[in-house]
């Protein structure tokens, strides 16, 4: 790390991160409070409240509003103290994993939110493994401490065991559940007291001089204080001290305790992201990596969102800036097509509010409205043919046939499905044999989301029906070998939306047979989103 040149101040102050958690751990609430402290919104929307008040700012698709879950990853930028935070919201529902995995390629760190009562849940574990693959630094927030939660040491043990990462406490809770009154900020030797009456009120901070300070007794009831002292002594003895280098290399996570709903512990977490979170990092690319301090601008598309504005059939490509200082109106080369694009109306997001971005620096995330030219995995540069690599596309785990309610509308359906395929919301396969489309997704809820979006955005009622196929594999090999294989297995062959050959399978036996009979072709469960 240390032999890298210092980054220009504008880039060095950026912190680009995602929040990962199991559904219902309180991620959307935490996002709200971040925006509240960042001065981006005046009053945090409540996820559970009634009617309009519960339309929280980061959930803008109709279905998310109806269900109260974050379905599409949106990006938000805001200033906090001397930092510029770029928060990429990952979909919280377990069925949206692929979008989430890709989001994690666009950030430099992750904030893991854990529910104090439930500890590490399955989805958190899955997402954590993706962070691990990329050695992403992770900061942990243990939420809902004001509800009945588990023993603090149990929570820390569970994280250490399940996720194989060292945990160091950045704060320590005083009391749990109804008795929870606040936290001791270990890093800054301060006592933070929670105000239960006003949920948007910042905690009262009292500077303390070590654990023996007489001020403790004035603020903390005797029985809570005795238990807290016993715990903190054990924690200091048994748990590792915070080592910033280990946090940056992903082997240690600092943990803060709090209650996002009560705005408690959130500011300390934000300070922690600023202090211990990484600056914009080097991006892996071919034929060479891209360093953020390079003066030439480059960036890559990690998400495409169609119809963000239903009145205009626009698509917004979310671009993570990898290097340089971008200015509105710049001409950038679209590496895949080798064409130049003038980026005249890039947007920055404050959730569903967008404003024109006059400039952006490495680490920022901007949206580029386009009519389908930009796809996931595309790289934009000032002329050099570099392609950012490592953005995965996964084989779908569920396949269904999709038909339009009105047979005359088959052409419209093709257009709608292709748009969703480009957005990365689903895989769309056109079988070479027979009619209709086969749609593949990673989780069952996505079929509902697609059906409701096709009806809402295109006015097309559709139905999904079971398919004889259970999974799909991309076929790789020399062109003549792939063609011969396709000709011999017509019933199983389809093309994806990029025109690549896909082998649709019913059983593992089909895959084994291909490996045995066609050694010159390989079947792959992932495809890099690169051209």
Image (cartoon, rainbow, N blue to C red):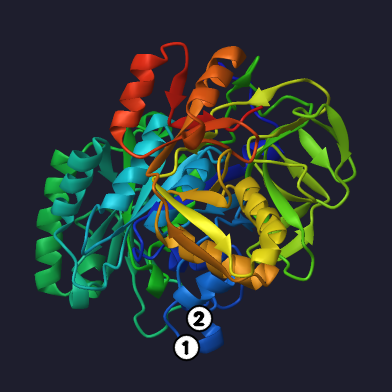
The answer to whether residue 214 is visible is no
| Mark 2 lies on residue | 54
Q: CA distance from mark 1 to mark 2?
A: 6 Å
Q: Is residue 256 left or right of residue 160?
A: right
- Return the x and y of residue 530 as percentages of the image width and height: 63, 29
Q: Is residue 97 above or below residue 520?
A: below
Residue count near mark 2 (Cα–Cα under 10 Å), binned few <14, some 14–19, many ≥20: some
Residue at the image position 35 percent from the left and 27 percent from the top:
511
Q: Is residue 11 left or right of residue 35?
A: right
Nearer to us in this view, 251 or 454: 454
Residue at the image position 36 percent from the left and 62 percent from the top:
23
Quadrant position of the C terminus in the picture = top right
In contact (CB < 8 Å): disc 1 and disc 2: yes
Mark 2 residue element: helix
| Mark 1 lies on residue | 50
Mark 1 residue element: loop
- Return the x and y of residue 222 as percentages of the image width and height: 12, 72
Quarter of the view holding residue 165: top left
Q: Is residue 481 above or below residue 490?
A: above
Nearer to us in this view, 310 or 359: 310
Residue at the image position 65 percent from the left and 14 percent from the top:
287
- Return the x and y of residue 510 as percentages of the image width and height: 34, 30
Quarter of the view holding residue 14: top right
Residue at the farthest bottom position? 50
Nearer to us in this view, 166 or 431: 431
Nearer to us in this view, 214 or 414: 414
- Return the x and y of residue 518 as percentages of the image width and height: 42, 15
Q: Is residue 465 left or right of residue 431?
A: left
Residue count near mark 1 (Cα–Cα under 10 Å), binned few <14, some 14–19, many ≥20: few
The answer to whether residue 176 is visible is yes
């Amino acid at each position: 790390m240390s032999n890298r040149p210092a980054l220009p101040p504008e880039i060095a102050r950026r912190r680009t991160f995602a929040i990962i958690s199991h559904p219902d751990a309180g991620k959307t609430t935490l996002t709200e409070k971040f925006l509240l402290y960042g001065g981006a919104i005046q009053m945090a929307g409540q996820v559970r409240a009634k009617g309009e008040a519960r339309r929280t700012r980061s959930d803008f698709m109709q279905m998310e509003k109806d269900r109260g879950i974050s379905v599409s990853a949106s990006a938000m930028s805001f200033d906090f103290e001397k930092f510029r935070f770029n928060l990429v919201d990952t979909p919280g529902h377990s069925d949206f994993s692929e979008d989430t995995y890709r989001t994690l390629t666009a950030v430099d760190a992750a904030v893991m939110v854990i529910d104090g009562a439930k500890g590490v849940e399955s989805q958190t574990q899955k997402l954590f493994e993706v962070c691990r693959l990329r050695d992403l630094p992770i900061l942990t927030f243990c939420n809902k401490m004001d509800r009945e939660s588990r023993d603090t040491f149990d929570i820390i043990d569970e994280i250490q065991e399940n996720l194989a990462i060292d945990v160091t406490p950045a704060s320590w809770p005083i009391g749990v559940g109804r008795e929870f009154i606040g936290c001791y900020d270990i890093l800054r030797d301060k006592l933070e007291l929670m105000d239960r009456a006003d949920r948007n009120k910042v905690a009262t901070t009292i500077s303390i001089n070590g654990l023996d300070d007489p001020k403790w007794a004035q603020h903390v009831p005797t029985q809570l204080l005795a238990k807290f002292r016993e715990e903190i002594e054990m924690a200091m003895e048994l748990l590792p001290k915070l080592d910033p280098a280990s946090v940056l290399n992903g082997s240690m996570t600092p943990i803060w305790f709090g209650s996002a709903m009560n705005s408690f512990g959130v500011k300390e977490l934000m300070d922690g992201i600023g202090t211990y979170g990484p600056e914009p990092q080097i991006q892996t690319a071919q034929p060479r990596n891209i360093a953020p301090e390079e003066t030439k601008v480059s960036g890559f598309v990690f998400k495409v969102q169609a119809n963000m504005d239903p009145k205009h059939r626009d698509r917004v490509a979310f671009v993570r800036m990898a290097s340089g200082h971008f200015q509105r109106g710049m001409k950038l080369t679209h590496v895949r097509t080798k064409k130049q694009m003038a980026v005249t109306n890039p947007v920055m997001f404050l959730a569903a509010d967008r404003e024109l971005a006059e400039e952006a620096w490495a680490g920022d995330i901007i949206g580029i409205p386009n009519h389908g030219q930009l796809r996931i995995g595309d790289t934009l540069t000032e002329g050099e043919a570099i392609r950012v690599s490592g953005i995965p596309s996964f084989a779908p785990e569920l396949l269904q046939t999709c038909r339009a309610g009105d047979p005359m509308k088959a052409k419209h359906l093709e257009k709608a499905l292709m748009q969703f395929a480009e957005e990365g919301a689903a895989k769309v396969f056109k079988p070479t044999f027979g009619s209709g489309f086969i749609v593949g997704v990673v989780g069952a809820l996505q079929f509902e989301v697609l059906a409701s979006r096709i009806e809402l955005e295109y006015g097309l009622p559709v139905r999904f029906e079971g398919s004889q196929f259970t999974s799909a594999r991309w076929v790789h090999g020399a062109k003549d070998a792939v063609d011969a294989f396709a000709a011999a297995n017509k019933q199983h062959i389809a093309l994806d939306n990029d025109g690549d050959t896909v082998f649709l399978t019913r059983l593992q036996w089909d895959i084994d047979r291909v490996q045995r009979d066609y050694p010159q072709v390989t079947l792959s469960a992932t495809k890099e989103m690169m051209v």
